[in-house]
Image (tube, rainbow, N blue to C red):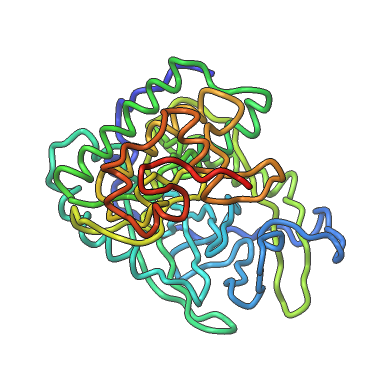
Amino acid sequence: MPAWGKLAIPFRSLHREAAAPEKPRSFPTSGFKTIDQDVKVEEEEIPDYVAERFYPVRLGEVIRDQYQTVVKLGFGSSSTIWLARDLKNHRYVSLKFYVHTSRFQRELGLYNEMTKLLAKTANPGRNNIRHLLDSFEIDGPCGKHVVLAFEPAQMSLRDMKLVFQKDGGFDEMFVRGAIQELLKALDLLHSEAHIVHTDIHPGNLLLGLDDDSALRPLEDRQFTSPVSRKEVAGDRTIYLSQLMRPKPGPMLLSDFGEARSGPGHHAGDIMPIQYRTPEVIMCLQWSYAVDIWSVGLTAWDLLGPKNLFTAEDEDGEMYDAAHLAEFIAAIGPPPLSFLKRSPERAADFWDEQGEPYRKA
């Protein structure tokens, strides 16, 4: 994998001369593989999946007379992501279709806070935060769905590792560059925007684009080798997500759905379980430091084949006690002063002298 590429001409700053809107393309209606009804694919494999919560995006669909969906890029528990052609502005965008029950307001609200700052700041971290280009609501069969339009990106570092580094991690130079750009993004978030991201991990670090030249072939492939799909009862089709072979580009920090505004201190559960800090596990208040903890774990996970912490016991069950034991094995026992900040929670695992309870 090449060293992290530097952004010479930011993709978001490329200006195009005004022109008449493009006409939508007509995508093939045959020539693709149909997946058997009994096989679960994509978002269907998510625990507690309910089809009606998701907007039934169709390949080639034109949204609001402006965005034509051309390739499915991915999915999550609360959204699907599609590459779309912006017919009015002659560019590609990534459309994030939220489920109609999603608590979308936090991400959109945080982006509304950041938009003015990103437009005026000279902080170099502005080039490492994924920019929101548009937002709107559309009607689905079972409710309204919020859609966010972002600058396009290639793929997450998690997906890159799963596909291209199955037996290990990235080389040190690549990871060093990625972490440097992540820290630039966090410097802007913490020092100027006063936002705690709370959800930093390789899945939310995207490999950006210097330009959109790599996207047209991804779209054109749908005409020569249409993507496999599963037709579901009720006029719903599930398409397989498509990946592109990555090339150097800027690192973009994405997904502000769990971010918090203000330095805090904040409270409550945050972060993927394996990435949770001691403060979160001990039910203490937290602030910017939780993001820095995640930077360290992200670097480890990018370099090696396994996560540093699993939060699992010997039977593979996730427990806070197992997670705390991993902390102690890695960095030593917590100081008594730390435990005294949360005496009730500490009493679940340690005695008054800070000694862990022994199994009977």
Place residue 103 in its image quadrant: bottom left
Q: Position of residue 200 (x, y in %)?
A: 40, 43
Q: Is residue 356 above or below residue 165?
A: below
Place residue 191 in its image quadrant: top left
Front residue (pair 6, 171):
171
- Left or right? Give the position of 140 relative to 92: right
Q: From the image, which quarter does the N terminus lie in?
A: top right
Q: Where is residue 49 in the image (x, y as percent from the top left)?
A: 66, 68
Residue that extends furthest to the bottom in the rendered view of this protein: 142
Q: Where is residue 258 in the image (x, y as percent from the top left)?
A: 38, 58
Q: Residue at x 52, y 83 (%)?
A: 143
Residue 20 can be seen, yes or no: no
Q: Is residue 336 above or below residue 76?
A: above
Q: Which residue is drawn at 44% across and 33% down?
A: 297
Front residue (pair 212, 47):
47
Q: Where is residue 77 in the image (x, y as percent from the top left)?
A: 57, 62
- Left or right? Give the position of 5 relative to 223: left
Residue 122 can be seen, yes or no: yes
